[in-house]
Image (cartoon, grey):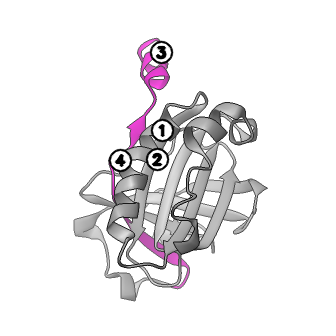
Amino acid sequence: MIYTVECSFADPASEAQWNDFYSLEKLPALISVSGFHTSQRFQALSDGCPTYLAMHTIDGLDILTGEEYRHQGGGNFASWQQHITDWHRNLYSDIGLAPAVKADEWLVLCSTGPEPLLALGLHPLAMHAVALEKFPPQRWLASLPRQQAPLAGTLPEGIFLYAPMTEQLRSSSLGQAEQTR
């Protein structure tokens, strides 16, 4: 399943420190939790959406309610909580592993349907919300080479571009499972 966390951050003075914490401490802590398989973080290039997006591949909702998640990965935002705004969490149906968006690519998300992504020549993956906020109820995602990307301001309504802030982290158990296939 795909677990997304979206938010903005309201304190410019500490935003760089928060980004370091999230990218360098939180993501590695999450990927160490049993049932987390991939984690990657993005920053929005488009207006009209939260500034930050973290996308994870996990086994299911029970991972997010477990002790290991609470102690190792989740819930350690206390010192940053007062500055986190526009916070949203969703769990989407299984599409396999979240795509690894490379440094020379952008992540494209759309909640109005696959057609705008198809018109860009992309092959979108459909995700249906199954838990947590369940909004938007469905999304389509794809990766787009930067050199083929239209300017964010010229995109059709409902399409959002995100630049990767990190490489996709993969759990060590995922690597072992892929080697046995």
**64 within the magenta span:** no
Q: Which residue was labeled with disc 4?
A: 24
The reply, left or right, for residue 137 in relation to residue 45 is right
For the residues labelled 3 and 2, the Cα–Cα distance comes to 30 Å
Type of the residue with mark 2 = Lys
Q: Is residue 105 in view?
A: yes
Q: How far apart are the alpha carbons under marks 1 and 4?
A: 9 Å
Q: On screen, 106 above or below 25?
A: below
Up-down relation of residue 74 to residue 60 (above or below): below
The residue segment tinted magenta is 157-180
Toward which corner of the image does residue 178 lie, by quadrant?
Answer: top left
Q: Are marks 1 and 2 in contact (CB under 8 Å)?
A: yes
Residue 181 image label: 3
Q: Position of residue 121 (x, y in %)?
A: 40, 65
* Foreground disc of the pair 3, 1: 1
Q: Amino acid at mark 1?
A: Ala
Query: Disc 3 and disc 1: Cα gap in Å?
Result: 26 Å
Tell me, yes or no, whether the two marked residues, 1 and 4, touch with CB atoms within 8 Å: no
Q: Label for residue 26? A: 2
